[in-house]
Amino acid sequence: MIDAFFIVTAKGDLLVRRLFRDDVNSNAPKTFRLNVVCAKEIRSPVLTIAGATYIFTRSEDVYLVAVVHGNSDVSMVFEILYRIQREFTDFVGKPVRESSVRSNLCFLYELLLELIDFGYPQPFGQELITTASVSRGKRKKSTAVMQPSVTSDVTGATPWRNPNTKYKKNEVYIDVIESVNMLVSAKGTLLRADVEGQIKMRALLSGMPECKFGMNDKIILDSEAQRGYKRSRRGPGIQMDDCSFHQCVRLGKFGQDRTISFIPPDGEFELMNYRITENIHLPFKIYPQIDQVSSTRIDIRVRIRAEFNRSLVAYDVLAKIPTPLNTADPSMSVTHGRAKYRPQNNAILWKIKKFPGGSECEFTAQVVLALSKKEWVRPPISIQFRVPMFTASGVRVRFLKIVESRLRYTPLKWVRYVSVGQSYEHRLSN
Protein backbone atom coordinates (compact mmCIF):
# COMPACT_ATOMS: atom_id res chain seq x y z
CA MET A 1 0.00 0.00 0.00
CA ILE A 2 2.55 2.64 1.18
CA ASP A 3 6.14 2.44 -0.05
CA ALA A 4 7.57 5.23 2.12
CA PHE A 5 6.58 7.82 4.69
CA PHE A 6 8.41 10.98 5.61
CA ILE A 7 7.85 14.31 7.32
CA VAL A 8 9.22 17.50 5.81
CA THR A 9 9.21 20.96 7.36
CA ALA A 10 7.82 24.02 5.59
CA LYS A 11 11.46 25.00 4.91
CA GLY A 12 12.15 21.69 3.20
CA ASP A 13 14.15 19.99 5.99
CA LEU A 14 13.66 16.23 6.36
CA LEU A 15 12.59 15.25 9.90
CA VAL A 16 11.40 11.65 9.60
CA ARG A 17 11.92 9.02 6.91
CA ARG A 18 10.59 5.46 7.00
CA LEU A 19 10.98 3.14 3.99
CA PHE A 20 8.62 0.16 3.80
CA ARG A 21 9.66 -1.06 0.33
CA ASP A 22 12.96 -1.14 -1.55
CA ASP A 23 11.62 0.37 -4.77
CA VAL A 24 11.55 3.94 -3.44
CA ASN A 25 14.05 6.42 -4.83
CA SER A 26 16.27 7.86 -2.10
CA ASN A 27 15.72 11.31 -3.63
CA ALA A 28 11.96 11.18 -2.99
CA PRO A 29 12.09 13.79 -0.16
CA LYS A 30 14.13 16.12 -2.39
CA THR A 31 11.66 15.64 -5.26
CA PHE A 32 8.79 16.49 -2.94
CA ARG A 33 10.61 19.60 -1.65
CA LEU A 34 11.25 20.91 -5.16
CA ASN A 35 7.74 20.26 -6.49
CA VAL A 36 5.62 21.07 -3.45
CA VAL A 37 7.46 22.96 -0.71
CA CYS A 38 9.17 25.31 -3.13
CA ALA A 39 6.18 25.63 -5.46
CA LYS A 40 4.34 28.94 -5.61
CA GLU A 41 0.95 27.24 -5.76
CA ILE A 42 -0.23 23.82 -4.56
CA ARG A 43 -3.28 22.68 -6.49
CA SER A 44 -3.72 19.14 -5.22
CA PRO A 45 -2.60 17.00 -2.26
CA VAL A 46 -1.96 14.15 -4.72
CA LEU A 47 1.00 14.55 -7.07
CA THR A 48 2.47 11.99 -9.50
CA ILE A 49 6.11 12.44 -10.56
CA ALA A 50 8.17 9.88 -12.49
CA GLY A 51 5.85 6.98 -11.68
CA ALA A 52 5.67 7.73 -7.93
CA THR A 53 2.60 9.29 -6.35
CA TYR A 54 3.07 11.68 -3.43
CA ILE A 55 0.04 11.93 -1.15
CA PHE A 56 0.42 14.51 1.56
CA THR A 57 -1.33 16.55 4.21
CA ARG A 58 -0.11 19.56 6.18
CA SER A 59 -0.13 19.98 9.95
CA GLU A 60 0.96 23.44 11.07
CA ASP A 61 4.58 23.84 9.83
CA VAL A 62 5.21 20.27 8.57
CA TYR A 63 4.08 18.03 5.72
CA LEU A 64 3.18 14.36 6.29
CA VAL A 65 3.93 12.55 3.01
CA ALA A 66 3.20 9.02 1.80
CA VAL A 67 4.82 7.69 -1.38
CA VAL A 68 2.99 4.98 -3.33
CA HIS A 69 3.40 3.21 -6.65
CA GLY A 70 0.70 1.75 -8.84
CA ASN A 71 -3.05 2.08 -8.43
CA SER A 72 -3.37 2.52 -4.65
CA ASP A 73 -6.44 3.49 -2.64
CA VAL A 74 -5.90 7.21 -2.09
CA SER A 75 -8.67 7.55 0.50
CA MET A 76 -7.08 4.77 2.56
CA VAL A 77 -3.70 6.51 2.43
CA PHE A 78 -5.26 9.76 3.62
CA GLU A 79 -6.94 7.84 6.45
CA ILE A 80 -3.52 6.51 7.55
CA LEU A 81 -1.96 9.99 7.44
CA TYR A 82 -4.75 11.50 9.51
CA ARG A 83 -4.60 8.60 11.93
CA ILE A 84 -0.88 9.19 12.49
CA GLN A 85 -1.68 12.81 13.31
CA ARG A 86 -4.51 11.83 15.64
CA GLU A 87 -2.56 9.20 17.56
CA PHE A 88 0.50 11.43 17.86
CA THR A 89 -1.60 14.29 19.25
CA ASP A 90 -3.48 12.01 21.67
CA PHE A 91 -0.37 10.48 23.22
CA VAL A 92 2.03 13.41 23.10
CA GLY A 93 -0.50 16.08 23.97
CA LYS A 94 0.72 18.43 21.24
CA PRO A 95 -0.17 18.79 17.55
CA VAL A 96 2.20 17.53 14.87
CA ARG A 97 4.66 20.34 14.27
CA GLU A 98 8.43 20.64 13.93
CA SER A 99 9.22 21.17 17.61
CA SER A 100 6.98 18.33 18.87
CA VAL A 101 8.28 15.91 16.23
CA ARG A 102 11.92 16.64 17.04
CA SER A 103 11.33 16.05 20.77
CA ASN A 104 9.35 12.81 20.21
CA LEU A 105 11.19 11.08 17.38
CA CYS A 106 11.43 7.76 19.24
CA PHE A 107 7.71 7.68 19.87
CA LEU A 108 6.92 8.57 16.27
CA TYR A 109 9.03 5.71 14.89
CA GLU A 110 7.41 3.31 17.38
CA LEU A 111 4.00 4.56 16.28
CA LEU A 112 4.85 3.94 12.61
CA LEU A 113 6.12 0.47 13.51
CA GLU A 114 2.76 -0.45 15.03
CA LEU A 115 0.49 1.28 12.51
CA ILE A 116 2.15 0.13 9.29
CA ASP A 117 3.78 -3.20 8.48
CA PHE A 118 5.53 -3.55 5.09
CA GLY A 119 3.37 -0.69 3.85
CA TYR A 120 0.05 -2.12 4.96
CA PRO A 121 -2.05 -0.57 7.76
CA GLN A 122 -2.44 -2.83 10.79
CA PRO A 123 -5.47 -3.28 13.07
CA PHE A 124 -4.62 -2.19 16.56
CA GLY A 125 -6.06 -1.02 19.83
CA GLN A 126 -4.97 2.07 21.69
CA GLU A 127 -3.94 -0.07 24.66
CA LEU A 128 -1.13 -1.57 22.56
CA ILE A 129 0.36 1.81 21.82
CA THR A 130 -0.04 2.81 25.45
CA THR A 131 2.02 -0.12 26.71
CA ALA A 132 5.00 0.52 24.45
CA SER A 133 5.04 4.19 23.64
CA VAL A 134 5.53 7.62 25.05
CA SER A 135 2.52 9.12 26.84
CA ARG A 136 2.49 12.88 27.30
CA GLY A 137 6.17 12.95 26.41
CA LYS A 138 7.29 10.52 29.20
CA ARG A 139 8.39 6.99 28.44
CA LYS A 140 6.62 4.48 30.66
CA LYS A 141 9.14 1.63 30.19
CA SER A 142 12.19 1.07 28.08
CA THR A 143 11.67 -0.04 24.52
CA ALA A 144 14.00 -3.00 25.02
CA VAL A 145 11.80 -4.38 27.80
CA MET A 146 8.42 -3.70 26.22
CA GLN A 147 9.11 -4.59 22.58
CA PRO A 148 8.65 -8.41 22.91
CA SER A 149 5.31 -7.92 24.65
CA VAL A 150 4.06 -5.54 21.99
CA THR A 151 5.26 -7.78 19.18
CA SER A 152 3.38 -10.75 20.60
CA ASP A 153 0.28 -8.64 21.11
CA VAL A 154 0.24 -7.20 17.60
CA THR A 155 0.96 -10.48 15.84
CA GLY A 156 -1.24 -12.57 18.14
CA ALA A 157 -4.92 -13.37 17.87
CA THR A 158 -6.16 -10.88 20.44
CA PRO A 159 -4.57 -7.44 20.05
CA TRP A 160 -7.73 -5.92 21.55
CA ARG A 161 -7.29 -7.50 25.00
CA ASN A 162 -4.68 -7.54 27.75
CA PRO A 163 -4.31 -11.09 29.18
CA ASN A 164 -3.48 -9.67 32.62
CA THR A 165 -6.94 -8.10 33.10
CA LYS A 166 -8.39 -8.91 36.52
CA TYR A 167 -11.70 -8.24 38.28
CA LYS A 168 -12.88 -9.13 41.74
CA LYS A 169 -16.40 -9.70 40.40
CA ASN A 170 -16.74 -11.13 36.90
CA GLU A 171 -19.84 -9.93 35.06
CA VAL A 172 -21.19 -9.63 31.52
CA TYR A 173 -23.97 -7.27 30.42
CA ILE A 174 -25.71 -7.81 27.08
CA ASP A 175 -27.99 -5.17 25.52
CA VAL A 176 -30.09 -6.04 22.47
CA ILE A 177 -31.23 -2.73 20.98
CA GLU A 178 -33.56 -2.65 17.98
CA SER A 179 -34.58 0.38 15.94
CA VAL A 180 -37.95 -0.26 14.30
CA ASN A 181 -38.90 1.25 10.94
CA MET A 182 -42.43 1.19 9.52
CA LEU A 183 -44.30 2.89 6.72
CA VAL A 184 -48.04 2.36 6.16
CA SER A 185 -50.01 3.81 3.27
CA ALA A 186 -53.09 5.99 3.68
CA LYS A 187 -55.23 2.91 2.92
CA GLY A 188 -53.61 0.91 5.71
CA THR A 189 -51.30 -1.20 3.53
CA LEU A 190 -47.93 -2.01 5.04
CA LEU A 191 -45.29 -0.66 2.67
CA ARG A 192 -42.19 -1.20 4.75
CA ALA A 193 -41.24 -2.88 8.02
CA ASP A 194 -37.70 -3.66 9.09
CA VAL A 195 -35.49 -3.71 12.13
CA GLU A 196 -31.91 -2.49 12.56
CA GLY A 197 -30.45 -4.20 15.60
CA GLN A 198 -27.35 -3.90 17.74
CA ILE A 199 -25.99 -6.31 20.31
CA LYS A 200 -23.77 -4.47 22.75
CA MET A 201 -21.72 -6.08 25.49
CA ARG A 202 -19.97 -4.87 28.59
CA ALA A 203 -17.45 -7.53 29.57
CA LEU A 204 -15.92 -7.23 33.04
CA LEU A 205 -14.00 -10.50 32.89
CA SER A 206 -10.58 -11.60 34.11
CA GLY A 207 -7.92 -13.27 32.01
CA MET A 208 -8.59 -14.47 28.45
CA PRO A 209 -12.15 -15.87 28.47
CA GLU A 210 -13.44 -17.88 25.51
CA CYS A 211 -17.04 -16.90 24.79
CA LYS A 212 -19.68 -18.64 22.71
CA PHE A 213 -22.83 -16.66 21.94
CA GLY A 214 -26.08 -18.12 20.63
CA MET A 215 -29.32 -16.61 19.32
CA ASN A 216 -32.54 -18.08 18.00
CA ASP A 217 -31.15 -18.10 14.48
CA LYS A 218 -33.47 -19.98 12.12
CA ILE A 219 -30.59 -21.79 10.42
CA ILE A 220 -29.25 -23.07 13.76
CA LEU A 221 -32.69 -24.13 14.99
CA ASP A 222 -33.43 -26.01 11.76
CA SER A 223 -30.06 -27.74 11.97
CA GLU A 224 -30.71 -28.77 15.58
CA ALA A 225 -34.17 -30.05 14.67
CA GLN A 226 -32.65 -32.30 11.99
CA ARG A 227 -30.29 -33.75 14.60
CA GLY A 228 -33.21 -34.59 16.89
CA TYR A 229 -33.20 -31.65 19.29
CA LYS A 230 -36.52 -30.22 20.43
CA ARG A 231 -37.43 -26.94 18.78
CA SER A 232 -37.66 -23.91 21.03
CA ARG A 233 -41.10 -22.81 22.15
CA ARG A 234 -40.28 -19.20 21.34
CA GLY A 235 -41.08 -19.54 17.65
CA PRO A 236 -39.45 -20.69 14.42
CA GLY A 237 -36.42 -18.42 14.78
CA ILE A 238 -35.24 -15.27 13.07
CA GLN A 239 -33.62 -14.90 9.67
CA MET A 240 -31.13 -12.05 9.32
CA ASP A 241 -30.83 -10.29 5.98
CA ASP A 242 -27.34 -9.04 6.75
CA CYS A 243 -25.05 -8.68 9.75
CA SER A 244 -21.57 -7.50 10.72
CA PHE A 245 -19.36 -8.31 13.69
CA HIS A 246 -16.69 -6.87 15.93
CA GLN A 247 -13.15 -7.83 14.92
CA CYS A 248 -12.93 -10.23 17.89
CA VAL A 249 -15.50 -12.64 16.35
CA ARG A 250 -14.08 -15.61 14.46
CA LEU A 251 -15.74 -15.17 11.09
CA GLY A 252 -14.54 -18.52 9.75
CA LYS A 253 -16.35 -20.34 12.54
CA PHE A 254 -19.52 -18.34 11.93
CA GLY A 255 -19.39 -19.13 8.23
CA GLN A 256 -19.14 -22.86 8.92
CA ASP A 257 -21.81 -23.47 11.56
CA ARG A 258 -23.20 -20.00 12.48
CA THR A 259 -21.38 -20.11 15.83
CA ILE A 260 -20.44 -16.73 17.29
CA SER A 261 -17.26 -17.41 19.23
CA PHE A 262 -14.80 -14.78 20.42
CA ILE A 263 -12.46 -13.48 23.10
CA PRO A 264 -14.09 -10.19 24.11
CA PRO A 265 -12.34 -6.83 24.53
CA ASP A 266 -12.30 -5.42 28.03
CA GLY A 267 -15.23 -3.09 28.77
CA GLU A 268 -17.96 -1.97 26.39
CA PHE A 269 -18.07 -2.86 22.70
CA GLU A 270 -20.57 -3.66 19.94
CA LEU A 271 -20.51 -7.39 19.32
CA MET A 272 -22.63 -7.27 16.17
CA ASN A 273 -25.32 -5.42 14.27
CA TYR A 274 -27.95 -6.88 12.00
CA ARG A 275 -30.93 -6.10 9.80
CA ILE A 276 -34.17 -8.10 9.56
CA THR A 277 -37.04 -7.47 7.13
CA GLU A 278 -39.30 -10.50 7.63
CA ASN A 279 -41.79 -11.47 10.35
CA ILE A 280 -41.58 -8.12 12.11
CA HIS A 281 -43.91 -7.78 15.10
CA LEU A 282 -44.85 -4.09 14.98
CA PRO A 283 -45.35 -2.77 18.53
CA PHE A 284 -47.95 -0.11 17.63
CA LYS A 285 -50.78 0.31 15.16
CA ILE A 286 -51.99 3.76 14.17
CA TYR A 287 -55.56 4.49 13.08
CA PRO A 288 -55.78 8.08 11.76
CA GLN A 289 -58.92 9.83 10.53
CA ILE A 290 -59.04 13.41 9.22
CA ASP A 291 -62.32 14.98 8.09
CA GLN A 292 -62.51 18.29 6.22
CA VAL A 293 -65.66 19.75 7.79
CA SER A 294 -65.38 23.08 5.97
CA SER A 295 -62.79 25.39 4.48
CA THR A 296 -62.10 26.76 7.97
CA ARG A 297 -62.25 23.59 10.06
CA ILE A 298 -60.94 20.04 10.12
CA ASP A 299 -61.53 17.25 12.64
CA ILE A 300 -58.67 14.95 13.56
CA ARG A 301 -59.01 11.61 15.31
CA VAL A 302 -56.07 9.32 15.98
CA ARG A 303 -56.08 5.98 17.79
CA ILE A 304 -52.88 4.19 18.77
CA ARG A 305 -52.99 0.60 19.92
CA ALA A 306 -50.15 -1.28 21.63
CA GLU A 307 -49.72 -4.70 20.01
CA PHE A 308 -47.25 -6.16 22.50
CA ASN A 309 -47.85 -8.25 25.61
CA ARG A 310 -49.91 -6.82 28.47
CA SER A 311 -47.08 -7.46 30.91
CA LEU A 312 -44.89 -4.93 29.07
CA VAL A 313 -45.01 -1.13 29.11
CA ALA A 314 -43.79 1.37 26.52
CA TYR A 315 -42.21 4.59 27.74
CA ASP A 316 -41.81 8.09 26.31
CA VAL A 317 -44.28 7.61 23.46
CA LEU A 318 -44.40 10.73 21.30
CA ALA A 319 -46.83 11.07 18.39
CA LYS A 320 -46.32 13.89 15.92
CA ILE A 321 -49.65 14.75 14.27
CA PRO A 322 -49.30 17.21 11.36
CA THR A 323 -51.57 20.26 11.04
CA PRO A 324 -52.16 22.67 8.12
CA LEU A 325 -49.92 25.71 7.74
CA ASN A 326 -52.91 28.01 8.29
CA THR A 327 -53.93 26.46 11.63
CA ALA A 328 -55.35 29.15 13.91
CA ASP A 329 -56.80 27.50 17.01
CA PRO A 330 -56.87 23.74 17.69
CA SER A 331 -59.08 22.35 20.45
CA MET A 332 -57.68 19.01 21.66
CA SER A 333 -58.59 16.17 24.02
CA VAL A 334 -56.77 12.91 24.85
CA THR A 335 -57.56 9.80 26.86
CA HIS A 336 -53.96 9.47 28.06
CA GLY A 337 -50.99 11.79 28.19
CA ARG A 338 -50.79 15.42 27.10
CA ALA A 339 -51.09 17.13 23.71
CA LYS A 340 -49.69 20.50 22.75
CA TYR A 341 -49.79 22.44 19.50
CA ARG A 342 -46.38 23.53 18.20
CA PRO A 343 -46.82 26.13 15.42
CA GLN A 344 -43.08 26.15 14.66
CA ASN A 345 -43.35 22.45 13.76
CA ASN A 346 -46.81 22.71 12.13
CA ALA A 347 -47.80 19.76 14.27
CA ILE A 348 -49.44 18.64 17.49
CA LEU A 349 -47.14 16.71 19.81
CA TRP A 350 -48.92 14.07 21.85
CA LYS A 351 -46.82 12.71 24.71
CA ILE A 352 -47.61 9.57 26.72
CA LYS A 353 -45.14 8.67 29.48
CA LYS A 354 -46.39 5.09 30.00
CA PHE A 355 -48.28 3.04 27.43
CA PRO A 356 -49.26 -0.46 28.72
CA GLY A 357 -49.33 -3.36 26.30
CA GLY A 358 -52.70 -4.29 24.82
CA SER A 359 -54.18 -0.86 25.63
CA GLU A 360 -55.43 1.86 23.32
CA CYS A 361 -55.14 5.65 23.50
CA GLU A 362 -57.16 8.16 21.54
CA PHE A 363 -56.62 11.74 20.44
CA THR A 364 -59.28 14.08 19.01
CA ALA A 365 -59.01 17.67 17.86
CA GLN A 366 -61.08 20.32 16.16
CA VAL A 367 -58.75 22.58 14.22
CA VAL A 368 -59.88 26.06 13.17
CA LEU A 369 -58.17 27.28 10.02
CA ALA A 370 -57.45 30.73 8.70
CA LEU A 371 -58.44 31.47 5.12
CA SER A 372 -55.83 30.23 2.67
CA LYS A 373 -55.74 29.35 -1.01
CA LYS A 374 -52.88 26.87 -0.59
CA GLU A 375 -53.78 23.20 -0.57
CA TRP A 376 -52.53 21.23 2.43
CA VAL A 377 -50.10 18.49 1.46
CA ARG A 378 -50.49 16.13 4.40
CA PRO A 379 -47.26 14.70 5.86
CA PRO A 380 -47.44 11.32 7.62
CA ILE A 381 -48.10 10.81 11.32
CA SER A 382 -44.95 9.60 13.08
CA ILE A 383 -44.38 8.21 16.55
CA GLN A 384 -41.37 7.56 18.75
CA PHE A 385 -41.27 5.09 21.60
CA ARG A 386 -39.16 2.87 23.83
CA VAL A 387 -40.34 -0.63 24.78
CA PRO A 388 -38.05 -2.46 27.23
CA MET A 389 -37.85 -6.29 27.18
CA PHE A 390 -39.39 -6.41 23.69
CA THR A 391 -37.82 -7.10 20.30
CA ALA A 392 -39.83 -6.47 17.16
CA SER A 393 -37.79 -9.04 15.21
CA GLY A 394 -38.15 -11.74 17.85
CA VAL A 395 -34.40 -11.97 18.50
CA ARG A 396 -33.56 -13.81 21.73
CA VAL A 397 -30.27 -14.63 23.39
CA ARG A 398 -30.31 -18.42 23.86
CA PHE A 399 -27.02 -18.79 25.66
CA LEU A 400 -23.66 -17.21 26.45
CA LYS A 401 -20.99 -19.70 27.46
CA ILE A 402 -17.84 -18.30 29.07
CA VAL A 403 -14.81 -20.46 29.79
CA GLU A 404 -11.53 -19.25 31.30
CA SER A 405 -9.37 -22.39 31.55
CA ARG A 406 -6.77 -20.82 33.81
CA LEU A 407 -8.88 -18.93 36.37
CA ARG A 408 -12.03 -21.13 36.23
CA TYR A 409 -14.62 -18.62 37.46
CA THR A 410 -18.40 -18.47 36.95
CA PRO A 411 -19.44 -14.97 35.85
CA LEU A 412 -22.80 -13.28 36.33
CA LYS A 413 -24.72 -12.66 33.09
CA TRP A 414 -27.34 -9.97 32.47
CA VAL A 415 -29.46 -9.54 29.33
CA ARG A 416 -31.69 -6.60 28.43
CA TYR A 417 -33.88 -5.99 25.39
CA VAL A 418 -35.29 -2.71 24.11
CA SER A 419 -37.07 -1.59 20.94
CA VAL A 420 -37.18 2.05 19.90
CA GLY A 421 -39.05 3.81 17.13
CA GLN A 422 -36.75 5.18 14.44
CA SER A 423 -38.83 5.94 11.34
CA TYR A 424 -42.34 4.82 12.29
CA GLU A 425 -44.88 6.53 10.04
CA HIS A 426 -48.47 6.27 8.79
CA ARG A 427 -49.43 8.27 5.72
CA LEU A 428 -52.58 10.41 5.56
CA SER A 429 -55.04 10.51 2.67
CA ASN A 430 -55.43 13.81 0.83
Image (cartoon, rainbow, N blue to C red):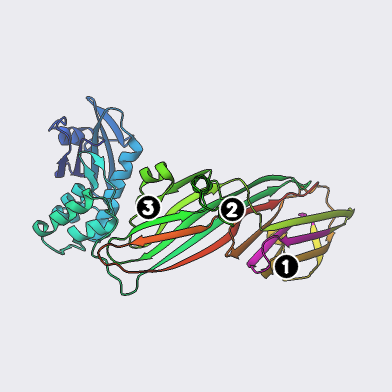
User: Could you tell whether 155 is left or right of 43 in the image?
Assistant: left
- Residue at x-position 17% and y-position 41%: 12
Q: Which mark is nearer the camera, 2 or 3?
A: 3
Q: Residues within 10 Å of mark 3 (few under 14, many from 20)?
A: many
Q: Nearer the viewer, residue 272 or 232?
A: 232
Q: Which residue is mark 3?
A: 261
Q: CA distance from mark 1 to mark 3?
A: 50 Å
Q: Position of residue 193 (x, y in %)?
A: 64, 48
**Distance from label 2 to label 1 (Cα)?**
33 Å
**Three-letter amino acid code at disc 2?**
Ser
Q: Measure how far apart labels 2 and 3 are at the Cα level.
A: 23 Å
Q: Secondary structure at mark 1?
A: strand
Sequence-earlier tag: 1 or 3:
3
Look at 34% across and 74% down and name the residue there: 169
**Magenta span of residues:** 300-326
Secondary structure character of the magenta stretch overall: strand
- Pointer 1: what residue? 340
Residue 70 spot, x, y in % from top left: 27, 27
Quick one: label 2 or label 1, which is nearer the N terminus? 1
Taking the view exactly as shown, the residue that stands out farthest to the left is 144
User: Measured from the top left, where is residue 130 in percent x and y?
Assistant: 23, 60
Q: Residue at x 41, y 49 (%)?
A: 259
Residue named by callout 2: 393
